[in-house]
Amino acid sequence: MNMITYEEKRSLIKKVIKQNLNLTFNEIVILDKLLYINKESIEAVELKKLLYNQNTPISIQINNLIELGLLKKSRDAYDERCIHLHDIDLSKIKSILEQYHTIVTSVLNTSTKK
């Protein structure tokens, strides 16, 4: 993939992803990490360690992914500060990421044909 072309079209890609998948780019990154981990449950802290910027809040993104039915969260019974992500639907996540890649490829191909 040509990174220069991608950067030129990044705003359009984000817009199309939001319209078609109802996801932000940050949520796509989180889904990619969840698929990479390949577990149906994980501590939120472990997920956050895999993200590029560990200081970025992810609670809003996690809540949106929960609303989309991709995972659930609960607090640890012994330590309420610990958030456990579970029932992670890896097959749905894989399907969404495939759609994401199709969208990116389509936008990039459309822009290079002009």
Image: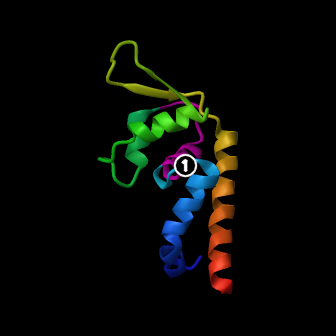
Closest to the observer, 4 or 33? 4
Residue 53, compared with residue 58, is above or below; it is below
Residue 83, compared with residue 50, is above or below; it is above
Q: Circle 1 sits on which residue?
A: 23
Residue furthest left as drawn: 55
Residue 6 point in image, percent of width and height: 53, 74
Closest to the observer, 77 or 66? 66
Which residue range is magenta in the image?
A: 27-42
What number of labels is visible?
Answer: 1
How many C-alpha atoms fall within 10 Å of the one at disc 1: few (<14), some, or many (≥20)?
A: many
Residue 100, compared with residue 46, is above or below; it is below
**Residue 48 picture quarter:** top left
Q: Residue at x 62, y 50 (%)?
A: 21
Pick the quarter of the image with the C terminus.
bottom right
**What type is the residue that disc 1 sits on?**
Leu
Pick the quarter of the image with the N terminus.
bottom right
Query: Is residue 34 left or right of 97 when viewed as pictured?
Result: left
Q: Residue at x 66, y 70 (%)?
A: 105
Q: Residue at x 33, y 17 (%)?
A: 79
Q: Residue at x 49, y 77 (%)?
A: 8
Residue 45, compared with residue 110, is above or below; it is above
Query: Is residue 32 left or right of 51 when viewed as pictured?
Result: right
Residue furthest top as drawn: 77
Residue 39 forms part of the magenta stretch: yes
Residue 25 point in image, percent of width and height: 49, 55
Residue 82 forms part of the magenta stretch: no
Closest to the observer, 82 or 113? 113
Residue 20 point in image, percent of width and height: 64, 53
